[in-house]
Image (spheres, rainbow, N blue to C red):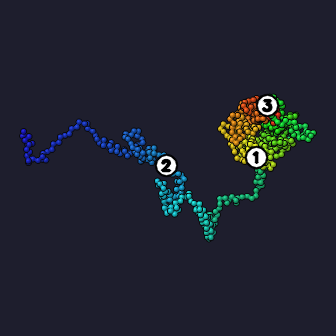
Amino acid sequence: MDLLQNYGDPDPDISPESSPPRVIPSKSSAPKVDDTLLALTVANAHRSASKPIDPTQHAVTFNPKYDQLWTPIYGPSHPYAKDGIAQGMRNHKLGFVENASIEPFVFDEQYNTFHKYGYAADPSASAGYNYVGDFDTLQKNDGISVYNIPQSEQKKRKIEKKKQKEMEMDEDENEEVDTVEVENPASDTWLMRNRKSPWAGKKEGLQTELTEEQKKYAEEYAKKKGEERGGEKGEIVADKTTFHGKEERDYQGRSWISPPKDAKATNDHCYIPKRLVHTWSGHTKGVAAIRFFPKHGHLILSAGMDTKVKIWDVFNTGKCMRTYMGHSKAVRDICFSNDGTKFLSAGYDKNIKYWDTETGQVISTFSTGKVPYVVKLNPDEDKQNILLAGMSDKKIVQWDMNTGQITQEYDQHLGAVNTITFVDNNRRFVTSSDDKSLRVWEFGIPVVIKYISEPHMHSMPSISLHPNANWLAAQSMDNQILIYSTREKFQLNKKKRFAGHVVAGYACQVNFSPDGRFVMSGDGEGKCWFWDWKTCKVFRTLKCHEGVCIGAEWHPLEQSKVATCGWDGLIKYW
């Protein structure tokens, strides 16, 4: 109670400050923790937010920000990049290069302008043209760049430069020059005085007189070149001819080539031949082509691979009438003139010869130094002096035989030219080539008016015109005969296609019967095939030759007679 009383009325003399304080020790149920490590971890987290991630560590214990992922690593400790740019940032061996949307031309223009005038457009300007550099020059030049100097200005500058040069030269001449300097090659004066154009020395060394040795060499070289040219132009062979008939003129004075009076002139209806009538043998090698005498067919001309051209009698004796020897290599093609009194022959000796059929004389020889693959005379009566030849160098060459001059060259094909066929009243002609295309030309104009080339097309080494002149039959190398219209569009007639024969690799001739009812062609197995024009069905095949049957011609007058030639050297009449 005393104690309570003491509490109840405190003594005024004793102050609470004077009493000693009592500290009660605090107790905690949690275990004791060393929080220095925690403080360090928090500080590290703050620091690592700005520190780049170490590329060698495998795990990241916190969520890094984008900036932190791309922060460059400074210092020599970085294992991959010496300049501190993270591997992912690099797009160039020297670091990171930003793309700038500026064209190379624009950059060059500004770069050169800056180097010349001291100002350039500011690439960082977002809109309009801001300039950097020398603003006084910019105003003076009106902001022009090195690439857009007006022409008048350029002219002025040229004239000024020229004048300046002339003045300098005059000054140099007027100056009294120290003679020692002029004679000293090390001095600038000597260099200025003895300055020459880079070509000046060339003229000095020119010899006017050739030595004996040089003359001799020049002569030999010229001779050799001449021989080569001769070889290029076509080999020169002495032209010979032999007449094998009884007499060149009969008792009435008529020539041996004149047609018989009793030859039937019309051919109403053609029939397919069935049996062999006659065989002409005289060529020692294969026969490349045959042609009947125009309009009458009483003689047949043949081109042999034995370099000879022969003409044979059809109606009477059936013998060889004349041999024409003027080529040194195989004869490739032959072509009669309209009246048959003259003909052309083209050989692998690069020569085209124009012969007189009756006498066997060579009227003229043409050559370009390339092999002619096909020769044709213009069928117009008034243009019988115009010769067209398809050459191995992709050209079609046109000669005027009266003057012997080349008057035109049709040069568009991409391969050797194989055929020339006149269409549309001889105003145009169609050519085929090894480039697997057909081209149509206006006669006399070397521009293609129609070009036919399809991915499925093959080379067409033989083309023939239908008697009604509306269609062309083209022997295609994929064993078929294709029909093209000769009208404006030269379209392929897809309904007419003649097949069954094997001609791949051979230029077998395709032909029509004179009434247009039948199509015929030789083939690579020695057969002659006949098709019906309307139905396109095979009508008949004849086994004609051993080896290739290369040519087939229908007689112009007799309804059912056909001549074929082959590489066995025979010409057969069916």
Percent coordinates x, y for residue 125 in the rendering: 47, 55
Quadrant, the N terminus: top left
The answer to whether residue 242 shows anywhere in this view is no
Displayed quadrant of residue 462:
top right
State the residue in front, 39 or 315.
Answer: 315
Q: Which residue is mark 1?
A: 398
Q: Nearer the viewer, mark 2 or mark 1?
A: 1
Instruction: Say which mark, if any, is on residue 99.
Output: 2
**Circle nearer the N terminus (2, 1):** 2
Q: Nearer the viewer, mark 3 or mark 2?
A: 3
At label 1, counting other C-alpha atoms closer than 10 Å, the crowd grade (few under 14, some 14-19, many 20 or more) is many
At label 2, counting other C-alpha atoms closer than 10 Å, the crowd grade (few under 14, some 14-19, many 20 or more) is few
- Amino acid type at circle 3 is Tyr
Please name the residue shown 73% across and 39% down the image: 470
Instruction: Say which mark, if any, is on residue 271.
Output: 3
State the residue in front, 487 or 524.
Answer: 487
The residues tagged by marks 3 and 2 sit, at their Cα atoms, a distance apart of 83 Å
Percent coordinates x, y for residue 100 in the rendering: 49, 50
Quadrant, the C terminus: top right
Please name the residue shown 30% across and 41% down the image: 38
- Amino acid type at circle 1 is Gln
Looking at the image, residue 88 sits to the left or right of residue 248; the answer is: left
At label 3, counting other C-alpha atoms closer than 10 Å, the crowd grade (few under 14, some 14-19, many 20 or more) is few
Secondary structure of residue under mark 3: loop
Please name the residue shown 37% across and 44% down the image: 48
Displayed quadrant of residue 336:
top right
**Circle nearer the N terminus (1, 3):** 3
The vertical placement of 199 against 559, above or below, is: below
The answer to whether residue 401 shows anywhere in this view is yes
